[in-house]
Image (cartoon, helix red, strand yellow):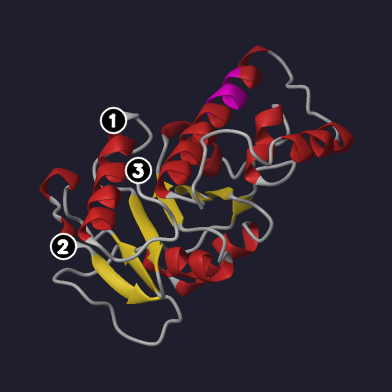
Amino acid sequence: MLKAPYQDTPELRQAIIDACKDMNRRGINQGTSGNISARAGGRMIITPSGIPYDKMTPDMLASLPIDGNGAPEGPFPPSTEWQFHLALLRAKPEMHAVVHAHPVHCTALAINRMEIPACHYMIALFGGDTVPLAGYELFGSDELAREVTGAMKERHGCLMANHGAVVVGETLEKGLWRLEELEVLARAYILSRTIGTPHILSADEIGAVLGAVKNYGMKTEA
């Protein structure tokens, strides 16, 4: 397991590819619709656009300066979603990875323009009493990047209207773990609505959980 903060090495690039493959194995992504990036010093390393994960090699990944001053480097264009990846890494210096995909249950809620309320104490893993919904904008646009970073100002993840979900992680592993937890929450919330009216935890109840989950979950070296 690589330790964060990361440097741009073949090992980091392979870890990004492996995380993409793991998303598909875990059923939280389909095909090449997801994309992953990692902070490596002053640059962002991100998956290229439209290349199947099983065909991807470390040299194919793209590199961009996090400060935005410079063109992408690499043999292939970066993911079409690079704008919000870059914006999140710039806005959240304590985070070292961004993981985006279209998990089915997260996407179903996003299609209905629904956030996830405090239906379960694990909602606190995302930094507050909701997993918010970012407004709809064209994929790959600066407007979408602004929507996502705005929704995640005080959160570690959000749903994206008529699109999917995105999370940040202190490490690649924790980002992948957080996205899987988000899909579990989305599925549980949807199922709970089919059998009754979900009980939503109060602000005080979630506030108590927020203090208790600071070190919860996958251990991170970040």
Sequence-earlier tag: 2 or 3: 3
Picture coordinates of residue 156, whole percent (x, y): 59, 50
Residue under label 2, please give it.
60
Q: Is residue 174 magenta?
A: no
Predominant secondary structure, magenta span: helix
What amino acid is at disc 1? Arg
Give the structural element (helix, strand or loop) at label 1. helix
Outermost residue toward the top in this view: 195
Give the structural element (helix, strand or loop) at label 3. loop
Picture coordinates of residue 184, whole percent (x, y): 52, 27
Q: Is residue 189 magenta?
A: yes
Picture coordinates of residue 100, whole percent (x, y): 41, 50
Residue under label 1, please give it.
25
Residue under label 3, please give it.
1
Q: CA distance from mark 2 to mark 3?
A: 21 Å
* Residue at (38, 34) in percent of width and height: 28
User: Is there CB contact under 8 Å for labels 3 and 1?
Assistant: no
* Frontmost residue, 110 versus 56: 56
Sequence-earlier tag: 2 or 1: 1
Outermost residue toward the bottom in this view: 69
| The N terminus, quarter of image | top left
**Over which residues does the magenta segment extend?**
187-191
Q: Examine the rendering and report whether any part of residue 47 can be seen.
A: yes
Give the structural element (helix, strand or loop) at label 2. helix
Q: CA distance from mark 2 to mark 1?
A: 22 Å
What amino acid is at disc 2? Met
What amino acid is at disc 3? Met
